[in-house]
Image: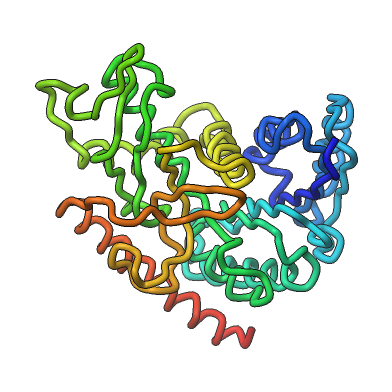
Amino acid sequence: MAVPVKVVVTGAAGHVAYSLLYSIASGEVFGREQAMTLALTDVPPLLGVLDGVAMELQDCTFQLLQGVTVTDLQEVAFRDVDVAVLLGAVTSREGTDSSDTFRANVRMFRSQGQALDAYAKKTVKVLVVGSPANTNCLVAMTAAPSIPRENFSCLTRLGQNQAQAQLALRLGTGPGSIRNVIIWGSQSGTWYPDMELTSVTHGSLREGLRQALGDAQLLPGDANMHIQHQGRTLKGMARPSGAMAVASAICDHLRALWSGTQEGELVSMGVISNGNSYGVPEHLIYSFPVTVQEGSWQIVPGLRVSDVSQRWMAQSAQELLAERERALRALAKSHL
């Protein structure tokens, strides 16, 4: 059995974490031979909930789980971690100022970035999930200058999974037969599913999406609208706001980072732009199609980008630039 990896999950008392932790501890994410320890952290009033979660994990008798730590102390939670899943974020409530929520998240993720910088391994892989994930990821990355920027990413895989599911329903097939749906942009209403490279498998035959659709028209705008409103629809149901789907997307993201992607497979990740990445401005966490080998992602170069995609990409980049400026102002105003 491999040397245990330490995984920290923030916001670990929430619904998403409850759906996620079973998959991690069972070996579905890091492999059936990879031992691990878990550090679960949340705000002090929820430590009792975390104690219950830890007891339940222990009662599952996972063979790979070598220990569970419950804490609200950053120096304990983040010390020597190999993987950090930052789920926790401040959410807006009815009657509250969204600007206050935004500033609170900036402070939170800067603090977590500083903790990672001080205590985590320099090889740590950091996945930011808490919304607005792109900007929160940028804040945490900026606050951890000793950790390579390439080690930070944010979750946009949920959009890819949702688009894949909708196409499967439209084609009357299983989601596993659909490959290379691409999500560009931000974890918000401006992200855009690009299906130009999407293919579908029928038996031993793989064909392009347009060919598979036949006479049916491909309407990416309609697909995009459906994905944008999917979260709101889930919140209106008697379920914990799509926690299972978010947890599954986190598993997919981490599995790709840990084990790599298959030949020819593209996955969507929010990663740092370098200024030469399809015209996206530098220093933005932006969802690109990537491949992953040996723990390192690479933005896939030279893909054909339609005029429609370019318009959506530009809109999303402008949104993220505005969020970045708001974050910088919040940090300056808070003297942090």
* Screen quadrant of the C terminus: bottom right
* Vertical relation: 197 (above or below) 271: above
Q: Which residue is drawn at 84% across and 44% down?
A: 4
Residue 287 percent across, percent down from the top left:
41, 55
Q: In which quarter of the image is residue 326?
A: bottom left
Question: At 53% across and 68% down in the image, what residue appears?
Answer: 138
Residue 54 left/right relative to 180: right
Residue shown at 49% from the left, 80% from the top: 328
- Report the quarter where the N terminus lies: top right
Q: How many marks?
A: 0
Q: In this view, does 303 lie to the left or right of 129?
A: left
**Where residue 8 sits: x, y (%)?**
75, 51
Q: Nearer the viewer, residue 62 or 205?
A: 205
Q: Nearer the viewer, residue 84 or 74?
A: 84
* Colour pattern: rainbow
User: Residue at 14% across / 21% down in the picture?
Assistant: 214
Residue 161 drawn at (x, y percent): 43, 35
Residue 280 in the image: x percent, y percent? Answer: 32, 67
Work out which residue is located at the far left of the displayed protein and give it. 215
Tell me if 79 is positioned left or right of 149 in this view: right
**Residue at the top extreme of this rendering:** 203
Q: Nearer the viewer, residue 180 or 52?
A: 180
**Residue 185 located left or right of residue 7:** left
